[in-house]
Amino acid sequence: MDKEERINQRTRLGNLEGWLSIAGNVALFGLKYWAGMVSGSVALIADAWHTLSDSFSSVIVLLGMKVSKKPADKEHPFGHGRAELIASLIIGVLLSVIAFSFILEGFEKLQDHKSANYGMIALIAVLASIAVKEGLAQFAFRAGKKTGSNTLKADGWHHRTDAFSSVLILAGIFLGEHIWWIDGVLAIIVALMIAYAAYEILKDAIDPLVGEKPSENLEKQLKEISRNELGYNPEIHHIHIHRYGEHIELTFHVLLPPEMTLKETHDHIEKLEKTIEDEMEMIATIHPEPE
């Protein structure tokens, strides 16, 4: 599969995941919010808003996919691939805000010594939420793995945390008759789970923006290609990698024999850059140095 096909596949799967997520989350929000109001469960109402926030993040996914597909232009010479990272940052911030609000609501319920009166509608809503959200999470994870999209993976974790929180609330339904404070405590636990997911998502998005260390496998591949093209084992150092979605810029220094002419050096470097682009799908800029 070539680069253009991968971009089209990423866009197609991203759009499908986004629209499925929006439809499923809006339906679950209505069901869980109604069940929370009937039962008086702050944890279930908060979980309903968490579900609705997934719809907001899915809109961000769709916008991120659309923007990242735009070709390079004068203002953005490396394309718009980092729009997906920005979308992931927004999802992470949304999760952080939701987690904080859950903690406040949980403590308020504990301070007021209020319990929840769970019923059959709450049980049905929670079971439906677990099934739908885990299904959406699995789809997002597989699509993210297939396309290499951080945004789809982030949205998958958003679905997964909602499924986890619903599992906890399911436990609370069975314990609620015996433990009055279970609903408030569950709201706080759910909030901490969401906060951790937010941290993971923000970390994965921030690292490529700040700059990432080249992997050992990448260094090994570069040395092997350089050896095959130059006919000996050159010393390579100062490796930098910059990702813009599907567009990846690579720079490094290579030591060449000092007796090489300028034309010979240029020809070797040009050939090496072309091979790296063909085999690694990276745009390389190589700085030659005399041994």
Image (cartoon, rainbow, N blue to C red):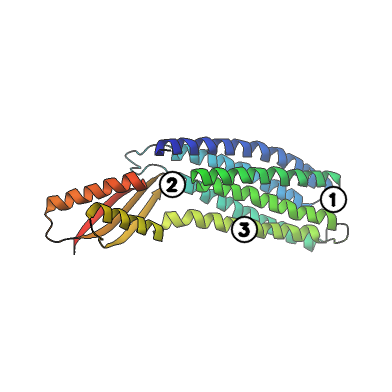
76 up-or-down from 169: above or below? above
Number of residues whose C-alpha sits closer than 10 Å to that of mark 1, classed few (under 14), some (14–19) or many (20 or more): many
Q: Position of residue 277 (x, y in %)?
A: 32, 45
Q: Quadrant of residue 245?
A: top left
Q: Type of residue at label 3?
A: Ala
The total of numbered circles placed on residues is 3
Identify which residue is drawn at 79% across, 51% down. Answer: 41
Task: Please identify the quarter of the rendering in which residue 120 is found.
Answer: top right
Task: State the residue in front, 32 or 243.
Answer: 243
Which residue was labeled with disc 3? Answer: 195
Marks 3 and 2 sit apart, C-alpha to C-alpha, by 24 Å
- Residue 100 visible, this angle: no
Do the residues bearing badges 3 and 1 touch, measured as CB atoms within 8 Å?
no
Q: Is residue 161 left or right of residue 32?
A: left
Instruction: Using residue 221 as the reference point, say whether residue 143 is left or right of it.
Output: right
Residue 96 percent across, percent down from the top left: 60, 55
Q: Which residue is mark 2?
A: 82
Which amino acid, by three-letter code, is at mark 2? Answer: Arg
Which class describes the residues within 10 Å of circle 2: few (<14), some (14-19), or many (20+)?
A: many
Quadrant of the snapshot with the C terminus = bottom left
Lower sequence index among marks 2 and 1? 2
As measured in the structure, the alpha-carbon distance from the residue carrying label 2 to the one carrying label 1 is 45 Å
Describe the element under mark 1 as helix, strand or loop: loop
Distance Cα–Cα, label 3 vs label 1:
26 Å
x and y percentages locating residue 56 in the rendered image: 60, 42
Report the residue marked by disc 1.
118
Q: From the image, which quarter does the N terminus lie in?
A: top left
